[in-house]
Amino acid sequence: MGERSKKQLNKYQLIDMGHALRNGNRFYTEANNQNWNDLVKEGFATKHPGWEENMAYFRVTEDGKKAMNLSDHQIGKLIHAFGLDYSKKPYRNYYFSGKNIDDEWEDLCSKGYADKDIQEDGIYYSGTLKGLRKVFRRNISAEYFEAI
């Protein structure tokens, strides 16, 4: 499954995958956990028998790790939203996509790097503090972010 699937990861899948990777790449839960079983179907995780009946542990695959990352194009969109392609410091925080949903921005939203605001004239995406820390500086404060 070398290329990333079109399926976007949901917030809970990202949280659980991150938890697994921080804990020896194992996540122990009910064997019928829908989020993890969807990840297995996509090739983003593997499923192994648990120690108890109806339980399993899941591991994130290399494709799963890649799906958690951002593409260079997505990073470029965040940089543009913050105005960092024109300035050394962020001075704005929006990206207008018209009436069309942008799949890359939707993925950024699902990963917590952006938010979406649907207005009458179209869809506005904005970066989150997590997004700004990804493209600018990790130690940016919430107060600095709110002032943009």
Image (cartoon, rainbow, N blue to C red):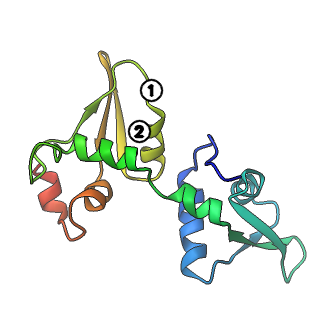
Local secondary structure at mark 1: loop
Q: Which residue is mark 2?
A: 105
In the image, is residue 72 above or below residue 33? Answer: above
- Which one is nearer the viewer's eye here, 56 or 54? 56
Drawn side of residue 16 relative to residue 43, left or right: left
Local secondary structure at mark 2: helix
Measuring from the top left, give residue 99's x and y in whole percent.
38, 18
Drawn side of residue 68 relative to residue 138, left or right: right
Measuring from the top left, give residue 36's x and y in whole percent.
71, 60
- Compute the Cα span from label 2 to label 1: 8 Å
Q: Mark on residue 101? A: 1
- Which one is nearer the viewer's eye here, 56 or 43? 43
Residue at image position (48%, 44%) is 107
Which residue is the extreme one toward the right? Answer: 53
Residue at image position (56%, 73%) is 19
Measuring from the top left, give residue 114's x and y in whole percent.
35, 46
In the image, is residue 11 above or below residue 139? Answer: above
Residue type at mark 2 is: Trp
The image quadrant that residue 65 belongs to is bottom right
Q: Mark on residue 136? A: none
Residue at image position (48%, 47%) is 110
Residue at image position (73%, 56%) is 43
Measuring from the top left, give residue 118's x and y in whole percent.
36, 26
Q: Are the residues at dot 2 and dot 1 in contact (C-beta closer than 8 Å)? A: yes
Which residue is the extreme one toward the front? Answer: 2
In the image, is residue 104 above or below residue 142? Answer: above
Check disc 2: other Cα within 10 Å, few if <14, some if 14-19, many if 20+: many
Check disc 1: other Cα within 10 Å, few if <14, some if 14-19, many if 20+: some
In the image, is residue 68 above or below residue 52? Answer: above
Residue type at mark 1 is: Ile
The image quadrant that residue 17 belongs to is bottom right
